[in-house]
Amino acid sequence: MKKIEIIIPNRGFTELDKILKDEHVGGVSYSRIEGRGKSKAKEVSVGRGTTHYVPDYIPRMKIEVVVKDNQVEDIVKKIVDALGGPALGGKIFVVDVPFALDLTTKERGESAL
C-alpha cells in the first residue's frame, strides 16, 4: 500500500477529486493548509485597499489517499496530466504504508482500504 499526499492550490481541488473518484479511490482526506515554497505570493490588499503586503504563506489544499500499490502509477499520471505545469503547481509525495487496519471490520492490509 502507498499513501499519496498531494499539495495543490485550492482551485485544483475539484478536478483532483474527480480524478480520484474515477480511479475508485474510496477514502480521501483533505486539509486546508498554508505554506511556502518556490511559488511566490501575490500582493494582497487589506482594509479598504489602502494597505498592501505580500504574505509569507500561501493557502493550499493537502489531499491524502491510501491506495493499492498497483494504482499508484495510474493515479499519479492522471494528476500530472490534468494539473501539471506552471499554471497550477504543487507537489506529490508517495510513501509506503506498511500496515492498515479497519476498526469496524477488523480487516488488515489492502482489504482494509
Image: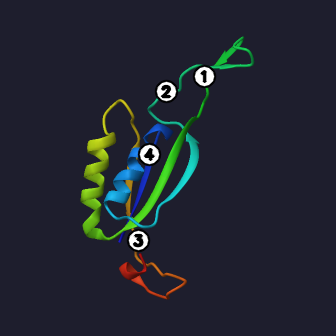
Q: Amino acid at mark 2?
A: Lys
Which tag is nearer the camera, tag 2 or tag 4? 4
Circle 4: element type: helix
Circles 3 and 1 in contact, beta carbons < 8 Å: no
Circles 3 and 2 in contact, beta carbons < 8 Å: no
Position in image of residue 72 (x %, y %):
29, 61
Most distant residue in the right direction: 47
Circles 1 and 2 in contact, beta carbons < 8 Å: yes
Circle 2: element type: loop
Q: Earlier in the sequence, mark 4 or mark 3?
A: 4
Return the residue at label 3.
97
Q: Residues within 10 Å of mark 4 (few under 14, many from 20)?
A: few
Return the residue at label 4.
14
Circle 1: element type: loop
Return the residue at label 2.
40
Which tag is nearer the camera, tag 1 or tag 4? 4
Q: Earlier in the sequence, mark 3 or mark 1?
A: 1
Most distant residue in the top direction: 50
Q: Amino acid at mark 1?
A: Val
Which tag is nearer the camera, tag 4 or tag 3? 4
Which residue lies at the image location 39% right of the left edge and 45% below the top edge? 15
